[in-house]
Image: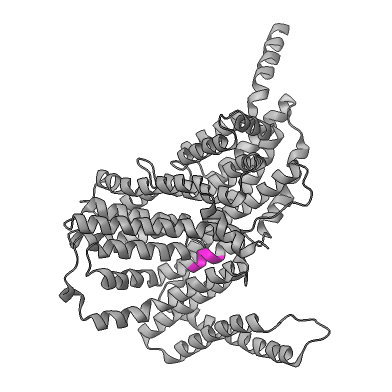
């Protein structure tokens, strides 16, 4: 009996120091088996917390902050932007506005070689700026554009590659959900890194900084995609033929139709992103305006379809009221509760109250139209599902990180990165490689909430710029989601592609775009100013 206890004691001594590593291995195993991510995170954390207590290597005080973590997550003003941006994108998708964008872009550019591919890339960038969700963009464009491109004689591999690559632009072009989540995590990691270095008045990094940092790299990627598509169309016209102008109709009519469809979504995206970059609004405020704007655009479109003039008038008035409020905020101090306000300020406040009273009328009219078209329930359902998924994973990841830290995982990660050859750059390269592989199996939400909080603090403590690191991670994940054989975008496209488009064709089609992505990562690694210059110009004194 004594020998048995002695052997058990030896076993405990051997296992206990490795609990943090075993915890990560167990989580990966559960995810590979297909268990829900949020519950795998929380369940693994509870099991290993119990094991740590049994082995005497874990202190319960580490999980005492868990309730505060949950409260902080649901009251985080940056994360409130997530459901608003998701709602904005879902409205544009379910109200067929995205479909109209594709149709009109195809008519505008279809008469030039490679025009359909160009239209897919441009619409992919626009949808990326409004949804930021890879699956939704790839599926939407795969259903709408791929059959048309094949019918027009496009090479199946070229068409599939163009659609898959355009769909992943939602990872990098702001405002996107991944940048909001990544910005919040990077901000917390940057403050933690500074506090550990003894800086008790730490600098902050906002979601707006990451938006500004990702804008130029995102536009560079779009330009590379367009240049490649034009090159293929000009050197091998059989792969991307032009549509005969006679089939598209008179040019004047095409432009008139486009001017009815394109301005509203473009104005919405410019207003949302422009207000964030200009510092006029926070991402959360801009997201709420974007959601309302998308709702009003959908209401106008459906009202035109049904010829309901009263509803359309209310919606137009509400849209003008929002524009009026934005302009009023730029020129008048609308703060309430001031002891001394000028006559012009008091008049401006009264006008603002009137405008605020008009907006709900247009929103109600839009909601009524969406309900009649049977689109409202689908919009609410999808928005609730995505939002619930994000916050449930966030809560599970919070518990996982607390237990992992209590088992000494933070120290293990820091030591591993410090031992990486090449210093800070070598450590960053190792992290990028790990995240790239994880992108084959995990969605960006799990990677951001689980991996980034573990690796970002030691990397930032080595002196890496937080905005540059965040943009590098976003581009890296975008490349991972596009890379065969496990890229998420490829699976989404395979699910909606016609039978004549084989998996091999999809893989072959994305290879040139992957090469462009890798080129972008290398250039960004050697020229960090691509990510840091615009935030410095906008937000640094």
Does residue 510 appear left or right of residue 67 in this picture? left
Asked whether 87 falls inside the magenta stretch, the response is yes
The N terminus sits in image quarter: top right
The residue segment tinted magenta is 84-88
**Percent x, y of residue 473:** 52, 47
What residue lies at 52% left-to-right and 35% top-to-bottom? 430
Q: Is residue 33 visible?
A: no
**Picture quadrant of residue 485:** top left
- Image location (x, y in percent) of residue 116: 26, 64
Q: How is the image coloured?
A: one colour
Q: How far across and down, in percent of the image, does residue 283 sit? A: 60, 65
Query: For residue 123: magenta?
Result: no
Q: Position of residue 132 (x, y in %)?
A: 47, 59
453 left or right, relative to 261: right
Of residue 452 and residue 61, the one placed in the foreground of this image is: 452
Give the quadrant of residue 359: bottom right
**Left or right of 120 on screen, residue 92:** right
Which residue is more in the foreground, 112 or 403?
A: 112
Please name the predominant secondary structure of the magenta segment in the image. helix
State whether residue 5 is above or below residue 505.
Answer: above
- In this rendering, position of residue 533 left or right of residue 3: left
Q: Identify whether 238 is placed above or below 108.
A: above
Which residue reaches farthest right? 339
- Residue 410 visible to an observer of this rendering: yes
């Amino acid at each position: 009996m004594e020998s048995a206890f002695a052997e058990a004691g030896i076993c405990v001594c051997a296992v206990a120091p490795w609990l943090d590593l075993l915890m990560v291995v167990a989580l990966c195993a559960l995810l590979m088996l297909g268990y829900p991510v949020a519950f795998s995170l929380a369940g693994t954390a509870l099991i290993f917390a119990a094991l740590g207590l049994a082995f005497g290597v874990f202190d319960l005080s580490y999980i005492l902050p868990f309730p505060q973590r949950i409260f902080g997550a649901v009251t985080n003003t940056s994360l409130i932007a997530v459901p608003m941006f998701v709602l904005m994108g879902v409205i544009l998708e379910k109200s067929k506005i995205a479909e109209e964008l594709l149709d009109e872009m195809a008519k505008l550019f279809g008469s030039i070689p490679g025009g359909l591919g160009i239209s897919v890339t441009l619409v992919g960038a626009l949808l990326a700026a409004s949804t930021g969700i890879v699956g939704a963009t790839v599926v939407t464009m795969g259903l709408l554009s791929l059959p048309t491109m094949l019918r027009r004689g496009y090479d199946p591999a070229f068409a599939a590659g163009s659609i898959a690559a355009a769909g992943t632009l939602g990872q990098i072009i702001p405002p996107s959900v991944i940048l909001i989540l990544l910005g919040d995590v990077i901000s917390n990691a940057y403050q933690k890194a500074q506090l550990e270095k003894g800086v008790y008045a730490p600098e902050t990094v906002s979601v707006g900084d990451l938006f500004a940092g990702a804008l130029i790299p995102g536009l560079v990627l779009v330009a590379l995609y367009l240049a490649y598509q034009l090159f293929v169309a000009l050197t091998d016209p059989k792969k991307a033929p032009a549509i005969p102008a006679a089939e598209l109709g008179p040019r004047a009519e095409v432009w008139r139709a486009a001017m009815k469809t394109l301005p509203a979504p473009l104005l919405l995206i410019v207003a949302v992103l422009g207000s964030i970059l200009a510092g006029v609004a926070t991402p959360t405020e801009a997201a709420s305006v974007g959601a309302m704007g998308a709702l009003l655009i959908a209401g106008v479109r459906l009202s035109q379809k049904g010829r309901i003039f009263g509803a359309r008038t209310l919606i137009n008035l509400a849209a003008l009221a929002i524009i009026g409020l934005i302009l009023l905020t730029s020129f008048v101090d609308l703060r309430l509760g001031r002891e001394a306000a000028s006559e012009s300020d008091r008049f401006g406040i009264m006008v603002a109250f009137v405008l605020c009273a008009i907006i709900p009328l247009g929103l109600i009219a839009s909601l009524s139209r969406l309900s009649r078209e049977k689109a409202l329930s689908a919009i609410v359902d999808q928005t609730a599902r995505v939002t619930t998924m994000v916050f449930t994973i966030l809560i599970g990841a919070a518990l996982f990180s607390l237990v992992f830290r209590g088992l000494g995982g933070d120290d293990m990660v820091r030591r591993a990165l410090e031992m990486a050859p090449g210093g800070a750059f070598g450590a960053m390269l190792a992290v990028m490689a790990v995240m790239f592989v994880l992108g084959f199996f995990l969605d960006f939400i799990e990677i951001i909430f689980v991996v980034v909080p573990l690796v970002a603090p030691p990397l930032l403590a080595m002196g890496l710029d937080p905005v540059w690191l965040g943009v590098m991670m976003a581009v890296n994940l975008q490349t991972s989601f596009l890379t065969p054989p496990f890229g998420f975008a490829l699976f989404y496209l395979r699910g909606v592609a016609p039978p004549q488009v084989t998996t091999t064709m999809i893989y072959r089609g994305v290879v040139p775009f992957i090469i462009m992505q890798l080129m972008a990562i290398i250039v960004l690694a050697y020229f960090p100013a691509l990510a840091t210059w615009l935030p410095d110009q906008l937000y640094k004194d």
